[in-house]
Amino acid sequence: MFTIDGSRMEGGGQILRLAVAVSAISATPVTVTRIRENRPRPGLAPQHIAAIRAVAGVCGAECEGLSPRSSEITFIPGRLRRADITVDPGTAGSIPLILQAWLPAALHAGGSIEVRGGTEVAWSPTIDYLENVLAPVLRRAGASIDIDVLDRGYYPRGGGRVRVRVDAARLRPVVIPGEEPACGIISCSSGLPEHVVERQAAAAQSLLEHDLKAPCTATLDHREGGPGAGSSVTAWMGAKGAVALGKRGLPAEKVGRMAARALVEECRRGGMVDVHLSDQLLIYIACYGGEYSTHTLSMHAKTACWLLSEFGYQLRCREGEVVEFSA
């Protein structure tokens, strides 16, 4: 039984999600203590419980401590198996973060998941980032990942619904292609006038084409109904992405420019992937090998490297003009 101190380094939900994912893959029981101890609201939140249950569904794990505000959980995995599951945190908790925990284990066995909650919420990648930045890297390595956004959900009402299907696969090493990457935007809204997505997209596209000197394809996803209103812009160029969320009183044009400027900043800095993708990919190169680089060694990446090493995975991280990860 491994024991992981959940208050170390990044000290948040990332440790919990990654610990149970690696536990399931390696068939190693784990206890996570002092969960989110230094956060304003320490312990488990509903979205963390949902993420653990999602991984447990892939391996038939026995779990202890899965209650709100719990500071310690034990996760005893069984055999990885194909499973079709549904997870609902009952809040606007981040669907993409729940999927981040589930996906590494699910790729070993195949299956599907339907998750409810927030498709685009603060302090999280959007579901469109998963579809257009993370998933393409994994698909090039041999993963079959189908993401269907049934309903969009925003804080505080939630109500989003996403279905993901994967096939069992032994991935090839993760590498980032060297050819000229394509640039794209998806502008989304639910419960708002259609002109919001149009204005967001136009502002983002204009800035990106001017600053990056490359054509940029824009996609609009306007939805009439839903339990709550909200909007987002996700922009990407190859394996670098950026997001911005709309909020009351913030002009649609500003939302579009925020996402575009963040992407331009990522593209102007060194490395093959953006700083957020760099930590998300570490579990995949630990399992399958590969290499990539980014411009900054983030605390999330440091935390992932430490945690994976605790389970016996050997990763190499070299800091220079760029940060290079390999396994």
Image (cartoon, rainbow, N blue to C red):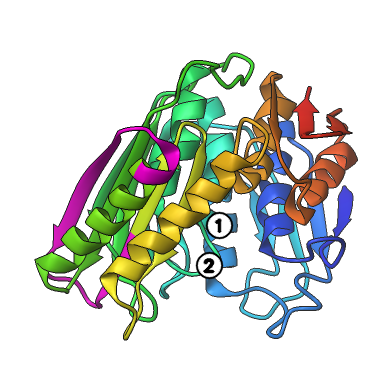
Q: Which residues are magenta?
A: 210-232
User: Are the residues tagged 2 and 1 within 8 Å (C-beta)?
Assistant: yes
Question: Can you identify the residue that label 1 sits on?
Answer: 51
Image vertical order of residue 230 relative to residue 282, above or below: below
Residue at image coords 55%, 16%:
178
Disc marking residue 31: none
Residue 283 is at least partly visible in this image? yes
Q: Above or below — where is 95 with respect to 229?
A: above
Corner quadrant of residue 39:
bottom right
Q: Amino acid at mark 2?
A: Gln
Residue 210, how many percent across, how many down? Answer: 36, 44
Q: Residue at x 74, y 53 (%)?
A: 300
> Residues under labels 2 and 1: Cα distance?
6 Å
Q: Is residue 227 magenta?
A: yes
User: In the shown orientation, is residue 44 left or right of residue 151?
Assistant: right
Eyeballing the image, is 93 above or below 147?
A: below
Which quadrant does the C terminus fall into? top right
Locate residue 148: give its quadrant.
top left
Label 2, on which residue?
47
264 w.r.t. 187: above or below: above
Q: Report whether 266 appears left or right of 263.
A: right
Q: What SS does tag 1 mark? A: helix
